[in-house]
Amino acid sequence: PQWSLVGSPENLALRETMAHGEDLENVRMARNNFVLWNLHFSLNGSTGIWRDSGADSCLWDGVRCDLAGRVADLDLEDKDFSGELPRTLYMLQHLRSLSLKGNQDLGATEGLPTFMIHMPLLHSINVCGTGYTNRGINAIR
C-alpha cells in the first residue's frame, strides 16, 4: 500500500509551524506550536481559532504559559472540536490544566488517553459536556 502523510494532522501542524520559522525564537516555541497545531488538526479544528495568531503560542487564545514559556494551561472550551486527543499532547510536560468543556463530539469513541497518567503536573481536566464524561475517567486517576 502507498502511504501518504500529506493531509495528516502532523503534516498540517508541521506546515503551520514552519510558516513561522524565522519568528520562532527557540526549540521550545517550535515544539509548543507543533503540538498545539497538531491538537487543532487532530480534533478536526476547522474554526481556525489560532489562524493569524503569530509565532508566540503563549499569546494564542486559550493558551497560558508559565514564566519559562512552557504551555501550562489550555482552555479549549466550546471550540466545536471532535475526535480524540492526540498523543503529541504528551509533549506538553508542564501542562497543569486542560479544559475541553462543551466540545460534545470530543471523546465519543475512546476514553481519555492513558498517556495522561504520565503527565505529573496535570492536575485539572474539565470534560463536562464531552464524550469523555461517560468513559475513561477512572483510567487517569
Image (spheres, grey):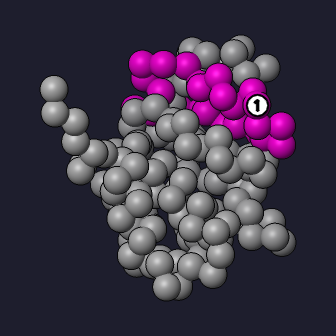
Range covered by the magenta-colored residues = 104-129
**Chief secondary structure of the magenta span?**
loop
Q: Residue 139 in the image: x percent, y percent?
A: 69, 15
The three-letter amino acid code for the residue at tag 1 is His
Q: Residue 132 in the image: x percent, y percent?
A: 55, 24
- Picture mark count: 1
Can residue 66 be seen here? yes
Magenta stretch: includes residue 108: yes
Can residue 64 be seen here? no
Is 57 on the left or on the right of 110, as rendered? right
User: Quarter-wise, where is residue 108 in the image?
Assistant: top left
Magenta stretch: includes residue 118: yes
Q: Residue 33 in the image: x percent, y percent?
A: 54, 64
Which residue is the extreme one toward the front?
1
On-image quarter of the N terminus:
top left
The residue lying toward the viewer, choosing from 72 and 68, is 68
User: Quarter-wise, where is residue 8 in the image?
Assistant: top left
Instruction: Count neighbours of disc 1 (C-alpha within 10 A) and say few if under 14, some if 14 to 19, many if 20 or more.
Output: few
On-image quarter of the C terminus:
top right
In the depicted structure, whether residue 136 falls above or below residue 52 = above
